[in-house]
Amino acid sequence: MPDFLPILLIILAYFLGSASAAIITCKVMGKDDPRSLGSKNPGATNVLRHAGKKAAAITLLGDVLKGLVPIVIGHYLDLTWGWLVLIGIAAFLGHLYPIFFGLQGGKGVATALGVYFGLNPLVGVVVAITWLIAALLFNTSSLSALIATLLAPLYFFWVTGSMDLFLGLVIITIFIYWRHRGNIMNIIDGTESKITEK
């Protein structure tokens, strides 16, 4: 395998991550730009509140695939955990800072979930179940995401024993917490929006 191929895949992952599923979906479906409504976040939760379940489902699927597909290709090329997690980080950062949309992207939870599924589908399911349980308990998307992504690096380290993977996923978690800092303050003062809230 050529030495430049993993680096090329990292670059391609960033560009794929930069394709905002929320903005593209809402535009194609004739809905308002999610960056102009509600939380102004181009993510599935904001799309659900303002454009409906169908648009939100398409957005969620698109954002997950952005994290999943490049890593699946990396597995096919038999890359190491270190390369795979770098590819995942590139796709994730593309979503957060999309070159196609003025570096103004989403908070990265769905794309991170795609990264988790790409790295190990079974552990990805565990992370998704963690989010679901937290969502059922608290009815708060952001809090559920914060809980699931905090535990994700620990889940992966327990299963794989890879320190490269653990550290890479910790980086993703740190970025997610940074992007959710406003939500964290809202959670603390009790004003954070609920998933079922219109």
Image (tube, rainbow, N blue to C red):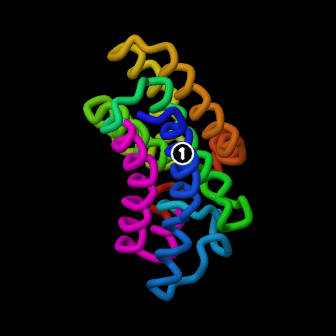
Q: Residue 142's x, y, as percent? A: 54, 46
User: Which residue in the protein does label 1 denote?
Assistant: 8
Give 163 or 41, whichever is nearer the viewer. Answer: 163
Give 132 or 11, whichever is nearer the viewer. Answer: 11
Above/below status of 72 relative to 39? above
Q: Residue 25's x, y, as percent? A: 47, 75
Give 103 or 128, whichever is nearer the viewer. Answer: 103
Residue positioned 54% across, 45% down in the render: 8
Residue positioned 39% across, 54% down in the render: 65
Amino acid type, residue under disc 1 in the picture: Leu
Q: Residue 104's x, y, as percent? A: 70, 61
Q: Which residues are magenta?
A: 46-74
- Can see residue 90? yes
Relative side of 31 to 123, left or right: right
Q: Residue 130's x, y, as percent? A: 36, 34
Residue positioned 53% across, 47% down in the render: 91
Magenta segment includes 190: no
Residue positioned 56% across, 20% down in the render: 167
Above/below status of 170 relative to 16? above
